[in-house]
């Protein structure tokens, strides 16, 4: 596909990288010459160093482009850019909209504005953090098929009953209603066979109905109730979105923000939240915030290194669940070296949404296209949701008789609202929602689970 990306900040640059890897023809429009030079030398893309006006969009090929993604820092500019692009002939447009009031209004007028998708990185981050705080035993939680199925990523610690247990024994001892979809060992993700044996330090991805996953965690003695007292350092957009979600879930929030005007606005907006207008990097301030008794800590300042250090300090104070926002990719590995297993990257979360949308566009001719896409296990594995439609060669045959790809696993089948963990005799029927886990990238339809 021919795709134009307007804006080469963190979000735009990440999208250019991911979409190029999937084989799309990318043109980036960016007025900052330094950013343009960096992208030109690191990616095989076209660039236009200019403001996103009519002339530059024409130069970028808007009249024949399949998709334009407006990802500048200005909501108004992004919306206007999409309107102009549609007028020029771009078939589909995606706008990044960050302000909450703008976002609600744009979602309401999405069809009238001719937008294919509206993305809000800060809201997406808040949603992901909120899910994990409600399931603190996990490092990542995602839901599929209208919350009928859940994928949960966690790390095996010393003393976990899974240590020295094979996959075969897992299903006999622990796996009622759940399935191990993938494992990360020594930094490499794989889909394990029955002989695979768990050991401490492994990252594990399990799939199942939410109640079955919760039951598994209880059997493994690692289940923890939803966080009740959370400290947030940083009252920016993610902090505001997250605070609203946590309050609605009945979670107590203490927020530390150094900017007095912002702190006062937060207090006015959320009267039940304890807001400290002070330096969140001060141990004394964190002590006043109740760090010794908090069961979760979220660092959302604008600096990756500060977020990493704050979370490390919170761990040393006994906080069980710590989450750091990390924007720069190279800080993810650094965060891991600090023992932090939950760095949140806005650009990767948004990349999932856009990739899902693009793959859906690519296969509009297919009825069994991608419904939902999630990248997990350090982005080494994709979990995709498909709807099985009549005429698919995958239907009404035992899975053991399908020529499934070696790098792909059917993780769950959702039928009439029930989450089914499949075995070799299971069959897919029209109307089923199918979850596939794969180390391969680029799947666009259900039939891609089969060997070519």
Image (cartoon, rainbow, N blue to C red):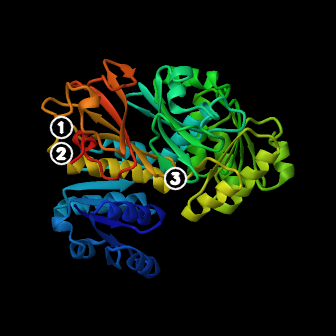
In this rendering, would 276 be left or right of 213? right
Q: Nearer the viewer, residue 46 or 448?
A: 448
Of mark 3 and mark 2, the one earlier in the sequence is 3
Residue 272 at x, y = what percent?
A: 69, 32
In what element is the residue under mark 2? loop
Q: Is residue 22 visible to the viewer in this orientation of the structure?
A: yes
Q: Residue at x 76, y 50 (%)?
A: 277
What residue is disc 2 on? Answer: 364
Disc marking residue 75: none
In what element is the residue under mark 1? loop
What residue is disc 1 on? Answer: 367
Q: Nearer the viewer, residue 46 or 250?
A: 46
Q: Residue at x 65, y 34 (%)?
A: 163
Which quadrant is home to the N terminus?
Answer: bottom left
Please determine whether, in this image, residue 322 is positioned above or below residue 60: above
Of marks 3 and 1, the one in the foreground: 3
Separation of marks 3 and 1 at Cα, in angstroms: 33 Å
Q: How many numbered discs, if any?
A: 3
Residue 80 at x, y = what percent?
A: 31, 60
Of mark 3 and mark 1, the one earlier in the sequence is 3
Neighbourhood count class around disc 3 (C-alpha, 10 Å): few under 14, some 14–19, many 20 upward: few
Separation of marks 2 and 1 at Cα, in angstroms: 7 Å
Residue 428 at x, y = what percent?
A: 25, 26
Q: Residue at x 73, y 38 (%)?
A: 320
What residue is disc 3 on? Answer: 188
Q: Residue at x 21, y 51 (%)?
A: 362
């Amino acid at each position: 596909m021919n795709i134009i990306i307007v804006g080469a900040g963190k979000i735009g640059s990440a999208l250019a990288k991911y979409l190029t890897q999937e084989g799309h023809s990318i043109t980036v429009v960016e007025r900052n010459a330094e950013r343009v030079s960096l992208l030109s030398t690191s990616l095989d893309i076209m660039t236009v160093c200019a403001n996103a006006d009519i002339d530059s969009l024409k130069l970028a090929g808007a009249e024949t482009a399949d998709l334009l993604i407006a990802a500048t820092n200005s909501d108004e500019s992004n919306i206007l850019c999409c309107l102009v692009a549609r007028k020029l002939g771009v078939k589909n447009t995606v706008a990044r909209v960050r302000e909450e009031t703008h976002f609600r209004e744009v979602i309401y007028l999405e069809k009238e504005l001719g937008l294919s998708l509206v993305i809000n990185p800060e809201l997406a981050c808040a949603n992901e953090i909120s899910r994990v705080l409600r399931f603190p035993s996990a490092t990542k939680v995602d839901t599929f098929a209208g919350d009928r199925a859940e994928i949960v990523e966690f790390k095996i610690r010393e003393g976990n009953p899974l240590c020295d247990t094979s996959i075969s024994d897992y299903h006999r001892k622990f796996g009622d209603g759940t399935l191990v979809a993938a494992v990360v060992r020594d930094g490499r993700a794989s889909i394990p066979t029955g002989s695979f044996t768990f050991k401490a330090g492994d990252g594990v991805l399990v799939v199942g109905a939410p109640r079955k996953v919760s039951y598994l965690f209880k059997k493994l003695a690692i289940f923890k109730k939803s966080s009740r007292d959370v400290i947030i350092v940083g009252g920016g957009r993610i902090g505001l979105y997250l605070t609203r979600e946590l309050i609605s879930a009945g979670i107590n929030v203490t927020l530390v923000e150094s900017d007095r005007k912002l702190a006062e606005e937060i207090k006015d907006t959320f009267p039940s939240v304890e807001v400290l207008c002070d330096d969140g990097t001060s141990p004394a301030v964190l002590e006043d915030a109740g760090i010794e008794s908090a069961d979760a800590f979220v660092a959302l300042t604008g600096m990756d290194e500060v977020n990493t250090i704050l979370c490390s300090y919170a761990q040393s104070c006994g906080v069980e669940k710590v989450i750091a926002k990390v924007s720069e990719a190279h800080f993810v590995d650094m965060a891991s070296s600090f023992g932090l297993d939950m760095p949140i990257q806005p650009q990767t979360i948004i990349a999932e949404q856009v990739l899902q949308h693009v793959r859906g566009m690519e296969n509009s001719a297919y009825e069994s296209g991608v419904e939902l896409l999630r990248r997990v296990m350090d982005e080494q594995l994709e979990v995709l949701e498909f709807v099985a439609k009549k005429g698919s060669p995958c239907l009404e045959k035992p899975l053991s008789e399908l020529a499934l790809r070696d790098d792909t696993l059917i993780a769950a089948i959702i039928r009439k609202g029930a989450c089914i963990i499949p075995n070799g005799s299971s069959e897919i029927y029209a109307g089923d929602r199918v979850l596939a886990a794969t180390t391969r990238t680029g799947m666009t339809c259900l039939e891609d689970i089969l060997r070519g």
